[in-house]
Image (cartoon, rainbow, N blue to C red):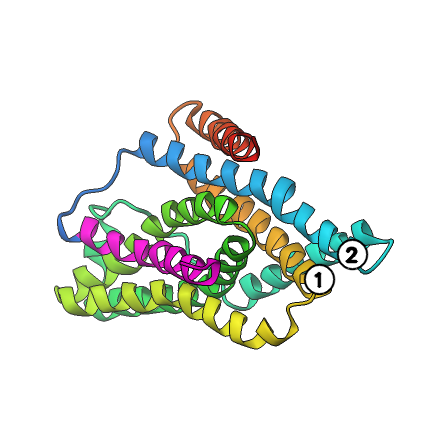
Amino acid sequence: MDNVSIAFAITLAAGLATVLGSALVFFQKTPSPRTLSFGLAFAAGAMVFVSLTEIFNKSIENFGKVSSFGLVWAAIAFLVGLVGVIVLDRLIPNPHETLDVQDPRFHDQKQSYLKRIGLMSAFAITAHNFPEGLATFFATVENPTVGLPLALAIAVHNIPEGISIAAPIYFATQNKKLTVFACLISGLAEPLGALIGYFVLKSFLLPETFGWVFGIIAGIMVFLALDELLPAAKRYADGHETVYGLAGGMAVMAISLALFAV
């Protein structure tokens, strides 16, 4: 398989992790809060490390091929990605629902309200999944050994997002098909974002294009890790799980990249 096919397959798999959230809701099982905290922080550590060491450096490298100010242009691209996703988050806030499906709020509210909350969550998360899919895809096209661990980190992140969509919809409607469909549509936004990005940019895949893409991706990934994954990890922590997970994610990413470089 060529890198484009591999990148699309990996992005699709990461997006479909959202559907796993609905399965957890159907069986009314949630991960241990401490395990969940460690996993989310681990994903955040991996995303921050790979963004600032590999993806950002790819931006500098590509800009350096056409300009003597590669670092400056990479920093500008990074800030564009950071500001862009902040604006998106302000326009369409990404909900951070509880993962406890036994929470009384899921049962005390009217069914129509719960259904509306679930569909609003699906819409917001779908909007945020487009740049995530674009980031995973282009990171993998450039270097599958970087894209795969990034996709795994995003997949871990997508499972609780799936729960936040599925729980209110399922408890309001008891309709498994509708619940899975809402999660599926949200998850498919990632490979869709990858396809749109690829077909829009494939005619312009020059060094400066990759410079902008990787710089923007680095900014997006750092924001997602700090704004979504770490706060969620801290919320479910009962000790030092967040710090251990963050350090563990960075360490594993650093070791894996060093091994692949040998």
Does the magenta-highlighted stretch encompass residue 15?
yes
Image mark count = 2
As displayed, is residue 232 above or below residue 122? above
Is 230 inside the magenta-drawn segment? Answer: no
Q: Is residue 68 visible?
A: yes
Q: Are marks 2 and 1 in contact (CB under 8 Å)?
A: yes
Q: Which residue is mark 1?
A: 207
The answer for how far apart the CA atoms under marks 2 and 1 are is 7 Å
User: Amino acid under label 1?
Assistant: Pro
Q: Residue 245 or 64: which is nearer the viewer?
A: 64
Query: Where does residue 38 sit, x and y in percent of width and height?
Result: 39, 31
Q: Is residue 184 left or right of residue 251?
A: left
Left or right for 24, reference 85? left
Residue density around tag 1, few if under 14, some if 14–19, many if 20 or more, within 10 Å: some
Which quarter of the image is occupied by the C terminus? top right
Q: Which residue is mark 2?
A: 65
Residue at x 54% of width, y 61% of height: 89
Q: Position of residue 174 (x, y in %)?
A: 12, 64
Query: Is 149 in front, or is 1?
Result: 1
Q: Residue 129: which quarter of the image? A: bottom left
Residue drawn at point x = 44 percent, y = 58 percent:
7
**In-front residue for pair 8/52:** 8
- The part of the chain drawn in magenta is 1-25
Say whether disc 2 or disc 1 marks the residue closer to the N-terminus: 2
Secondary structure under tag 2 reads loop
Expressed as whole percent of the image width and height from the top left, the position of residue 177 reads 15, 68
Q: Nearer the viewer, residue 167 or 17?
A: 17
Amino acid, disc 2: Lys
